[in-house]
């Protein structure tokens, strides 16, 4: 094609936007007034815009007028439990123990597959609105989540939650889900295996799942060393840290996305360094603060070992939103404080964690996480014209410290427009919210005394 | 007037809204489907709504359809430097010392009165949009801020910033500003005296200003014990804490709004308890985290002594926004973590700090901070229908942990509508942003080597 040719038929041009370039290291840059040319779901070219907005047409590319907007790589939510939006705000001001044992695990025993389907769809709507294009999920009834993701147009890596208390058949079921769904929806749905945590899954099951993961080429998404007390408890009960359990059961060897890791200690670092190329930790600071945890994820030490760090929200029963802007801002703020260094976790580093970091954490670093030719076209157009962003000295700082999810205008995933100028195109938000509200009373009723599991790490 | 009569001519009825009732203590409540009747800038009555929206008319009250919206008391930003929006995002990833000495104080030496006027107006636009109806300001060229506030329709307490390095004439100037402006704009503008801090204002000037404050019935708004290192430095240099300096110079006796107070220590508490009825501390956690400070404001200890605690943003050169939703959420999150108690700083307590707490901190506790008959009509209508708030198990939790400034639809101050369904009515936002952007290059130029002050606390 010629230098200024439109994209091929069925393609997309985002015209005249500024573009955030997130390099693998160093400062992020903002390229002014570019055209992003997309075909077959892939970014073909990013080039200085011509003066006029190209016109679309029947056999031509769709054109989005991006003038005045800043294109950023779609954000990655590296750890969540999407259907928990159904319990948003239903477990406030309680201890971690009460959160699990009195609120969330009893409520979860009420969930039906249909609830999970509605919850996941609603979560997709919220994430599209806030510029999250990919998420790592971990939950029950994963087929219903996969269906929601496939229909919404988002990208997700879905780990079916497994407790040893569920038995061998349930374990086989999670493996079956992986075999059915990994790579589905044109590759937008991938699967990781999802043992819940070393304190709810025994070593034999962890070994079995690690074996399946290696056999199928899957990663393992697992909660581990969620806070220091868990690590201390593990040391007391069995003499080794939760991270060493992951090593001894083959989880690290398979490639692990570890949720939280606030209890990762000095002695874990050499072990993690051995597997640095395939290990990631998702940091979700809002829930750590809310649950009064200290210390937080040791992000600086992890990055120093070469482990990937990514940004997550965790489920909305703790985080209340699935807003990665909020989460990435809190990563920057809390990590500066944690190491008492205001010059660290810079604006550029923070943006990198939420994009490239998330992509690598999900095993998708060669496909997403940056706006570059050859990458899948996961593009978020943000509008930084509001008074809370102005004057705009530095758009990168505005993204980290001023912007809100509501500043996201248009969202493209795999070259398909999922939201255009604030209008959701793949999800019927109003109908979903009505459906969700109708299910609430039943889900919140914990008078039966059941729970999916008991928390005693 | 009869039970269902409309408000008097020129009045206002907010019809059919839910109402957040913030009690002086205990749980906040949500009253469903109420009419808020306003006349002469005052809430006359809050009563269950009739079925239909009352019709306004030539001689009748203006009617705002509040159905589906939640009315909350206008938020109070208890510590800011509003014109610093001009430096938003221009001092990132630096130490506290570099922030003051290399970035902010050199930039501030470039500011003209006209800059301050534009900055303050832009800040007013941002605050109206985010549901802040009252703010405590502390800055240079206070007349230009007062003019901006008067025109915008907002409410503010303005403290003219004073350094001893500015000399006696400048001190007299700040007193003259107070005499001219305290109680202006129908009482919407009040004035506090504004010595910058015990480390930039000498004891003699603090005593002089305390005397003026007592004479004029004004409060004193001052930075003190901003972080622990300042307290340690004060103990080392002069043997007493910054809080004891405020005591010895009459500042506490006059009535003080203390910004930050992260360096308030055990030995300060009995002293603060003596003046608890007239002392307040504004907590602005985003800037503490960003500047890697620890410990934070000892909010639990302060509340235990009876001191008022309020929520602030500080200036946008540190906080990047003037968004009190963001600030109050961070107060809840960071204070839970600070005392390692997830059951503390509950949703209701947090909402109270940002409303009644702020009102008391500014000496306005009898006028604003709650939606009750007899209070000035500072009303914010929030729209919690977005997917990030749904399902809506508990609107109070949604306000603290899910809502965003962008969910504010309509803002009323003193009975006057300042924003209606997202449209600003008193500020020309686009023109202001253009004006602000045009001033940026000059304000950011620090090649001259001047500064308003040197930081060495």
Image (cartoon, coloured by chain):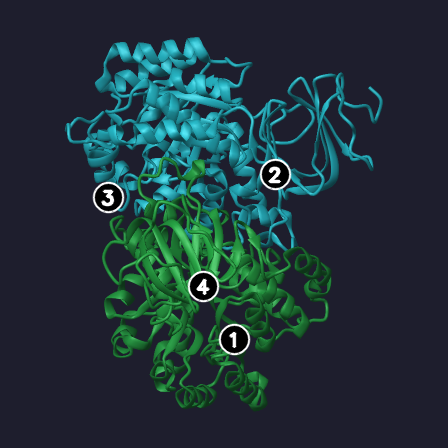
Chain colours: A cyan, B green
Q: Residues within 10 Å of mark 4 (few under 14, many from 20)?
A: many
Q: Which residue is mark 2?
A: A25
- The residue where tag 3 is placed is A95
Q: Is residue B295 visible?
A: no
Chain letter for mark 1, please: B
Secondary structure beneath label 3: loop
Residue A160 x %, y %: 36, 19
Q: Mark 2 vs mark 4: tell me if same chain.
A: no
Residues behind callouts 4 and 1 on a single chain: yes
- Contact, CB < 8 Å: mark 4 with mark 1? no
Q: Mark 3 falls within which chain? A: A
Residue A51 at x, y percent in the picture: 82, 37
Give the label, 1 or 3, closer to the camera.
1
Locate residue A312, reporting x and y percent.
Answer: 44, 35
Question: Disc 3 to disc 4, how far (Cα)?
Answer: 47 Å
Discs 3, 2: same chain:
yes
Q: Nearer the viewer's eye, disc 4 or disc 1?
A: 4
Label 2 and label 4: CA atoms lie apart by 59 Å
On screen, residue A322 versus residue B392, left or right, reads right
Left or right: residue B112 versus residue B135 is: right
Where is residue A353 shown, x and y percent of the image? Answer: 52, 38
| Alpha carbon distance from label 3 to label 2 | 39 Å
- Tag in front: 3 or 4: 4
Residues at badges 2 and 1 in contact (C-beta under 8 Å)? no
* Tag shown at residue B185: 1
Q: Are marks 2 and 1 on the same chain?
A: no
For residue B11, which numbered disc appears in the image?
4
């Amino acid at each position: 094609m010629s230098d200024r040719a439109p994209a091929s038929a069925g393609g997309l041009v985002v015209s005249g936007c500024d573009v955030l370039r997130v390099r693998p290291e160093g400062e992020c840059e903002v390229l002014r007034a570019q055209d992003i040319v997309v075909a077959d779901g892939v970014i073909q070219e990013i080039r200085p815009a011509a003066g006029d907005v190209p016109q679309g047409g029947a056999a031509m590319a769709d054109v989005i007028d991006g003038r005045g907007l800043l294109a950023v790589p779609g954000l990655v939510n590296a750890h969540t439990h999407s259907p928990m939006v159904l319990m948003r705000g239903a477990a406030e001001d309680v201890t971690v123990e009460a959160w699990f044992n009195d609120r969330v695990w009893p409520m979860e025993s009420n969930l039906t597959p249909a609830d999970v389907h509605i919850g996941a769809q609603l979560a997709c709507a919220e994430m599209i609105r806030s510029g999250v294009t990919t998420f790592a999920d971990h939950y029950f009834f994963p087929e219903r989540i996969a269906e929601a993701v496939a229909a919404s147009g988002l990208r997700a890596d879905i780990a079916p939650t497994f407790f040893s208390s569920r038995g061998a058949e349930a374990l086989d079921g999670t493996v079956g889900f992986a075999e059915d769904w990994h790579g589905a929806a044109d590759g937008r749905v991938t699967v990781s295996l999802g043992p819940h945590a070393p304190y709810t899954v025994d070593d034999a099951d962890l070994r079995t799942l690690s074996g399946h993961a290696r056999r199928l080429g899957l990663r393992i998404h697992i909660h581990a060393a969620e806070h220091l007390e868990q690590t201390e408890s593990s040391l007391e009960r069995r003499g080794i840290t939760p991270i060493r359990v992951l090593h001894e059961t083959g989880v690290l060897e398979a490639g692990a996305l570890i949720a939280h890791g606030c209890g990762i200690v000095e002695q874990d670092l050499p072990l993690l360094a051995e597997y640095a190329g395939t290990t990631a930790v998702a940091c979700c600071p809002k829930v750590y603060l809310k649950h009064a945890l200290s210390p937080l994820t040791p992000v600086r030490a992890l990055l120093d070992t070469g482990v990937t760090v990514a940004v997550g929200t965790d489920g909305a029963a703790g985080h209340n939103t699935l807003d990665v802007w909020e989460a990435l801002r809190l990563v920057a703020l809390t990590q500066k404080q944690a190491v008492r260094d205001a010059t660290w976790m810079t604006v550029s580093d923070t943006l990198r964690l939420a994009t490239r970091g998330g992509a690598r954490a999900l095993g998708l670093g060669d496909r997403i996480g940056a706006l570059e030719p050859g990458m899948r076209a996961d593009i978020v157009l943000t509008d930084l014209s509001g008074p809370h962003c102005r004057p705009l000295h530095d758009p990168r700082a505005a993204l980290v410290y001023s912007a809100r999810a509501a500043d996201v205008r248009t969202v493209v995933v795999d070259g398909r427009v999922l939201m255009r100028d604030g209008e959701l195109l793949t999800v019927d938000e109003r109908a979903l919210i009505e459906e969700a509200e109708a299910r609430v009373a039943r889900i919140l009723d914990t008078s039966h005394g059941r729970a999916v599991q008991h928390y005693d790490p």
